[in-house]
Image: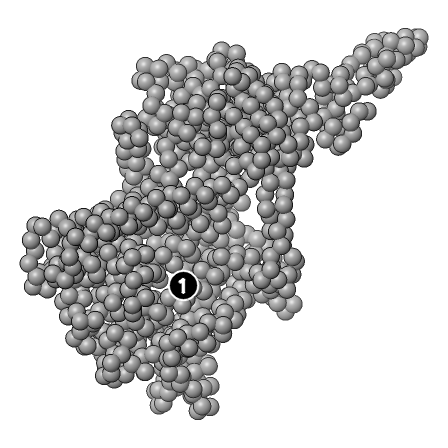
C-alpha cells in the first residue's frame, strides 16, 4: 500500500470579486460577484514509504494547497487522496497520530512556556510511552543540539533555536509522515543549512516519509532525490531531480578560461564535443569546464512556461 | 479637504466589505432597544406612571436614545488602542494629515453608516412597537438640542482618544475599556432616564461626562425649557476638559510610542 | 473516546488554564482587578435597574421585587458558570487568522476542545463564588424554602444549560470558520442572552417561546426561579435534556459542514 496516493486531486475556491470605489462596494453589498479560483487543477502522484519528496513551484502554484489536502486541513473539491490508508479529511485519531505538520514562520509551541513543557504535553496528547518518549527526546535534542535551551521560555529563544524546538515537537511522536510547508522561509543561510542537514540525517536514520514544499532551489537540491514540480495547479514534472535537467534542457554550458577572463557558451548537447574541441584550438585557453545548466535556470524557465530551451 | 473626504469614503468601503459583520451590528442595535422596551411594557404597559414617566413617555425616551446612539456612539476610534499596540498607528502618523482629524473623519463615516441604516430600521420599529414620537418645533430648543448633540459627539470622541491612548503605556487596553463600556451602559442614560434615579445619584452622575452623551441631549430635545442653556453649558465645559485632556495625554503618549510590531 | 484520551484532555486543559493564570499574574494584575470590578459593576447596574423599575412598580410579570432580584442573581450565576469553559470563542477569530487553528485541526485532540476550552479564565471561577452567595441571599429574601431536592434540581438545570450553551458556542465558531465573523455573532448571542435576566414572559408569546425552546436563556433564570417558587414541574426537565442532546448533535453537524468550506490561512 503506498504511503500517499493522490488521484486527480482538485481544489477550487469561490472568491468574491470586489469592485473598486464607494459605489463599487455598495454594489458588492447588494449583488456580489463570485469567481471560481482554481488552486489545484488536477494533481496525481504516488509516494512510497521512506521517500523524501519536494514539491517545488512558484508562489501560488498550489503546492501548499496540495499539502494541506494531504494533511487533512482542506477538503478537496474533486479527486481522491489516501494517506497511510486514511482519508485525511476525516482527521481520524490514528491518522493524526501518524503525521506531523511544520509550517515555516508559524509556531505551535507555547509562547510563554519552556520548550520542554510543550514536549511533555505532546507526550500526553499523542499517548507516547514514557521510555520511548525519553529515548526519542534525547535523540532529537542531541541531533539538533538544543539541550541547553530546553528550559528557556520559547519567546526568549532565537528564531533558529525556536525552529529547532519546533522540529522536536513535530517529531517527538515519531510520525510516519512529516509535512513541511516552506520550512526554511525567513531563516538565515546558516540556519537553512543546518535544517537541511538535520532533515537529511533524520530521513536516513528513521523510517517514515518527508514531504516538503519550497520555492528555494537549495532546499530541493540538498534534500530531495525526487521532485514534483507544480505550477498553476498542475504537475509539470514528477521524477528524479537529476533528470530534470536532462529532460528540460537541451543545452550544456562550456566555460572557457583565458588570461583575459572567462567566457561562457551555451551549446546544444549533441554539439558539445565538437564545440569544445573547437574552442580548445585557441592557444590562450588555460582551462575549460563543461557544466550542466544551473538547475535554477531550468526550473525558472519551466515556470516561465518554456517547455524546452 | 479632499483627502479627508477620501478617508471618509474609504472608511465606508471598509464597513461595507464585511456584510455579515455589518448586518450583525445593526441587528444588535435593534436589540439595544428591545430589552428595555419589553421591561417597560410589562411594568407600565397597562397604565400608570413611574417617577413621572408614563409608558408613552418612556417609549419616546427609548426611541430617542436609540437614534442618538447611532449618531453619538458610532465610532471607529475604539480601535485606537489596538492600533497603538500593534504598531499600526505608524501608518496614519506618517501621513501628511492631522491624526485627530483622521480619526474624527473615520468616526463620521461610521456615524453616517449607522444613521443610514437607522432610517431603514426606524419605520420597522415604529410599525411594530408604535412608540409615540415627539417632534420638537421650538426653534430655540431645537438649536440647543442640536448643539448638545454636537458636543456629545465630540465628548465621546475625546473619551475614546483618552482610553485608546492608554495603549501607549499598557499592553492591555481591554480591561479599562470593558469597565468604561459597563459604566457608560448605565451612566449615559441608555438603559433608563437618569432622572428616575434618586437625587443623590443624579448629582453624582452630573460629575461625570456620561449623561451628556445621551440623556442630556435628549432631555433638551424633549423640552427641558429653562434648564437647557445651563445643561448645554455643562456639555461645553466637559467638552473643553476632555478635549484638553485628550490633547495632553496624546502628546505625551506619542513621545513614548515604540511602533513595535511593525 | 478512550480513558487515556480523557486523561490527555484533562491534563491539557489544566496546563492551559494554569498557564493562563500564570500569564495573568505576570502581565496583567491590574487588568484582572479591573475586570472583576467591571463584572461586579455590571451586576450592580442590572440590580439598580431592577430596583428602579420593579421597586416602584411592585410587580413585573407577576413577580415581586424580591423574586425579580432572585431571578437576576440566578441568571448571573448560571450565565457565568455555563460560559466558564467556553471563553476560547473570544480568541477564535485571531486563531484562524494567524494559522493556529490549522494546528488545532491536526492535533489528535479535538479542535473544538482547543477552540472553545483553551482560554478558561481562572478569574471566572473565582468570581462565581460570591455569585453563589448572592443567589443564596436573594433566595432567602424571597421567603421560599431552600431544600436539598430543589438545590439538586438547580444543579441539573445548570448542567443542561451548560450543554446547550456549548452547542450554541459551537454554532458561533462554525459561523466564524465559514465567514471569519465571530465577534459580532458572539455579542449578538450575549445580547439575546441578557434577555434571560428578566422573566421571559415579558417578551410576549413569541419571545418567550424563542427564549425557552430555541435558546437556553429561559433555563438560565426564569425556569429555575419558577422551580423554587413551585411553579414548574421538574419532569419537564427531561424534555430539556432531550433538547440539549438534539442541540449538541445539530451543532456538531453544522460544525463539520462549515469546515468543508474552510480555506485555511494562506502561507
Q: Residue at x 58, y 32 (%)?
A: A79
Q: Position of residue B181 (x, y in %)?
A: 35, 62
Say whether residue A265 is left or right of residue B196.
right
Q: Is residue B174 above or below residue A247?
A: below
Say whether residue B116 is left or right of residue C24.
right
Q: Is residue C146 above or below residue A41?
A: below
Secondary structure category for the residue under label 1: helix
Q: Residue at x 83, y 14 (%)?
A: A269
Q: Is residue C83 above or below residue B246?
A: above
- Color style of the picture: one colour
Q: Position of residue B258 (x, y in %)?
A: 49, 48
Image quarter of residue B244: bottom left
From where the camera sits, is residue C223 visible? Answer: yes
Q: Residue at x 29, y 57 (%)?
A: C213
- Can you say which quadrant of the picture contains the C terminus of chain A? top right
Residue matched to label 1:
B28
Question: Between C133 and A91, which is closer to the camera in this rendering?
Answer: A91
Question: Between C93 and C63, which is closer to the camera in this rendering?
Answer: C63
Please give the chain letter of the residue carrying mark 1. B
Say whether residue A156 is left or right of residue A37.
left
Q: Position of residue B73 (x, y in %)?
A: 43, 68
Q: What is the total number of numbered labels drawn onto the structure image?
A: 1
Q: Position of residue C4 (x, y in %)?
A: 28, 26
Question: Between A309 and C257, which is closer to the camera in this rendering?
Answer: C257
Question: Between C250 and B93, which is closer to the camera in this rendering?
Answer: C250
Q: Is residue A117 above or below residue B58?
A: above
Q: Residue at x 48, y 22 (%)?
A: A85
Rate crowding at label 1 as few (under 14), some (14 to 19) or many (20 or more) other CA atoms within 10 Å.
Answer: many
Say whether residue A24 is left or right of residue A48.
right
From where the camera sits, is residue B85 visible? Answer: no
Amino acid at each position: 500500500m503506498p504511503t500517499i496516493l493522490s488521484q486527480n486531486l482538485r481544489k477550487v475556491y469561490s472568491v468574491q470579486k470586489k469592485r473598486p470605489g464607494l459605489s463599487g462596494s455598495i454594489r458588492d453589498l447588494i449583488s456580489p460577484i463570485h469567481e471560481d479560483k482554481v488552486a489545484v487543477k488536477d494533481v496525481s502522484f504516488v509516494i512510497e514509504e521512506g521517500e523524501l519528496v519536494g514539491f517545488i513551484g512558484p508562489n501560488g502554484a498550489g503546492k501548499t494547497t496540495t499539502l494541506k489536502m494531504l494533511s487533512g486541513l482542506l477538503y478537496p473539491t474533486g479527486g481522491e487522496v489516501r494517506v497511510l490508508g486514511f482519508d485525511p479529511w476525516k482527521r481520524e485519531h490514528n491518522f493524526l497520530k501518524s503525521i506531523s505538520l511544520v509550517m515555516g514562520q508559524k509556531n505551535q509551541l507555547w509562547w510563554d512556556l519552556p520548550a520542554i513543557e510543550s514536549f511533555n504535553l505532546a507526550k500526553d496528547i499523542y499517548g507516547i510511552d514514557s521510555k520511548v518518549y525519553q529515548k526519542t527526546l534525547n535523540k532529537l535534542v542531541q541531533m539538533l543540539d538544543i539541550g541547553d535551551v530546553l528550559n528557556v521560555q520559547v519567546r526568549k529563544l532565537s528564531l533558529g533555536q525556536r525552529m529547532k524546538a519546533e522540529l522536536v515537537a513535530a517529531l517527538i511522536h515519531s510520525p510516519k509522515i512529516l509535512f513541511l510547508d516552506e520550512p526554511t522561509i525567513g531563516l538565515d543561510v546558516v540556519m537553512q543549512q543546518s535544517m537541511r542537514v538535520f532533515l537529511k540525517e533524520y530521513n536516513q536514520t528513521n523510517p517514515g516519509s518527508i514531504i516538503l514544499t519550497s520555492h528555494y532551489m537549495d532546499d530541493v537540491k540538498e534534500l530531495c532525490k525526487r521532485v514534483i514540480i507544480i505550477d498553476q495547479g498542475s504537475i509539470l514534472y514528477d521524477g528524479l531531480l537529476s533528470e530534470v535537467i536532462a529532460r528540460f534542457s537541451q543545452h550544456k554550458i562550456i566555460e572557457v578560461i583565458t588570461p583575459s577572463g572567462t567566457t561562457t557558451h551555451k551549446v546544444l548537447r549533441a554539439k558539445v564535443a565538437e564545440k569544445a574541441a573547437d574552442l580548445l584550438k585557441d592557444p590562450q585557453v588555460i582551462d575549460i569546464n563543461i557544466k550542466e545548466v544551473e538547475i535554477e535556470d531550468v526550473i525558472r524557465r519551466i515556470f516561465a512556461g518554456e517547455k524546452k530551451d | 479637504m479632499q483627502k479627508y473626504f477620501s478617508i471618509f469614503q474609504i472608511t465606508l468601503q471598509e464597513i461595507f466589505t464585511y456584510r455579515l459583520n455589518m448586518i450583525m451590528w445593526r441587528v444588535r442595535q435593534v436589540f439595544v432597544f428591545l430589552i428595555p422596551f419589553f421591561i417597560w411594557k410589562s411594568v407600565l404597559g397597562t397604565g400608570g406612571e413611574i417617577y413621572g414617566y408614563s409608558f408613552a413617555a418612556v417609549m419616546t425616551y427609548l426611541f430617542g436614545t436609540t437614534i442618538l446612539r447611532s449618531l453619538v456612539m458610532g465610532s471607529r476610534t475604539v480601535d485606537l488602542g489596538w492600533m497603538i499596540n500593534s504598531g499600526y498607528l505608524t501608518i496614519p502618523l506618517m501621513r501628511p494629515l492631522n491624526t485627530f482629524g483622521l480619526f474624527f473623519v473615520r468616526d463620521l463615516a461610521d456615524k453616517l453608516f449607522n444613521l443610514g441604516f437607522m432610517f431603514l430600521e426606524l419605520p420597522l420599529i415604529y410599525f411594530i412597537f408604535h412608540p409615540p414620537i415627539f417632534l420638537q418645533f421650538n426653534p430655540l430648543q431645537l438649536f440647543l438640542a442640536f448643539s448638545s448633540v454636537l458636543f456629545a459627539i465630540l465628548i465621546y470622541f475625546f473619551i475614546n482618544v483618552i482610553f485608546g491612548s492608554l495603549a501607549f503605556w499598557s499592553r492591555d487596553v481591554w480591561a479599562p475599556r470593558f469597565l468604561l463600556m459597563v459604566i457608560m451602559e448605565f451612566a449615559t442614560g441608555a438603559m433608563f432616564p437618569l432622572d428616575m434615579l434618586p437625587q443623590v445619584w443624579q448629582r453624582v452622575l452630573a460629575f461625570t461626562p456620561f449623561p451628556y452623551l445621551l440623556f442630556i441631549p435628549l432631555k433638551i430635545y424633549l423640552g427641558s425649557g429653562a434648564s437647557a442653556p445651563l445643561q448645554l453649558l455643562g456639555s461645553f465645559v466637559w467638552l473643553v476638559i476632555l478635549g484638553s485632556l485628550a490633547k495632553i495625554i496624546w502628546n505625551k503618549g506619542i513621545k513614548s510610542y515604540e511602533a513595535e510590531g511593525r | 473516546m478512550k480513558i487515556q484520551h480523557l486523561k490527555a484532555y484533562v491534563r491539557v486543559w489544566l496546563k492551559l488554564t494554569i498557564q493562563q493564570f500564570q500569564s495573568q499574574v505576570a502581565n496583567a494584575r491590574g487588568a484582572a482587578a479591573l475586570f472583576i470590578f467591571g463584572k461586579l459593576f455590571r451586576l450592580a447596574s442590572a440590580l439598580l435597574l431592577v430596583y428602579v423599575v420593579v421597586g416602584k412598580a411592585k410587580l413585573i410579570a407577576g413577580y415581586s421585587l424580591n423574586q425579580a432580584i432572585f431571578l437576576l442573581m440566578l441568571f448571573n450565576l448560571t450565565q457565568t458558570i455555563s460560559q466558564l469553559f467556553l471563553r476560547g470563542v473570544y480568541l477564535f477569530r485571531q486563531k484562524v487568522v494567524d494559522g493556529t487553528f490549522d494546528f488545532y485541526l491536526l492535533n489528535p485532540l479535538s479542535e473544538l476542545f482547543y477552540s472553545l476550552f483553551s482560554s478558561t479564565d481562572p478569574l471566572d471561577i473565582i468570581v462565581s463564588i460570591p455569585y453563589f452567595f448572592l443567589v443564596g441571599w436573594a433566595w432567602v429574601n424571597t421567603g421560599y424554602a431552600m431544600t436539598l431536592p430543589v438545590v439538586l434540581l438547580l444543579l441539573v438545570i445548570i448542567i443542561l444549560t451548560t450543554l446547550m450553551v456549548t452547542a450554541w458556542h459551537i454554532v458561533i465558531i462554525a459561523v466564524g470558520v465559514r465567514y471569519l465573523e465571530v465577534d459580532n455573532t458572539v455579542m449578538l448571542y450575549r445580547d439575546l442572552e441578557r434577555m434571560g435576566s428578566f422573566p421571559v414572559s415579558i417578551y410576549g408569546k413569541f419571545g418567550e417561546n424563542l427564549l425557552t425552546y430555541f435558546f437556553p436563556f429561559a433555563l438560565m433564570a426564569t425556569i429555575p426561579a419558577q422551580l423554587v417558587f413551585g411553579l414548574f414541574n421538574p419532569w419537564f426537565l427531561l424534555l430539556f435534556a432531550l433538547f440539549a442532546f438534539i442541540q449538541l448533535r445539530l451543532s456538531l453537524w453544522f460544525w463539520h459542514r462549515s469546515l468543508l468550506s474552510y480555506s485555511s490561512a494562506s502561507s
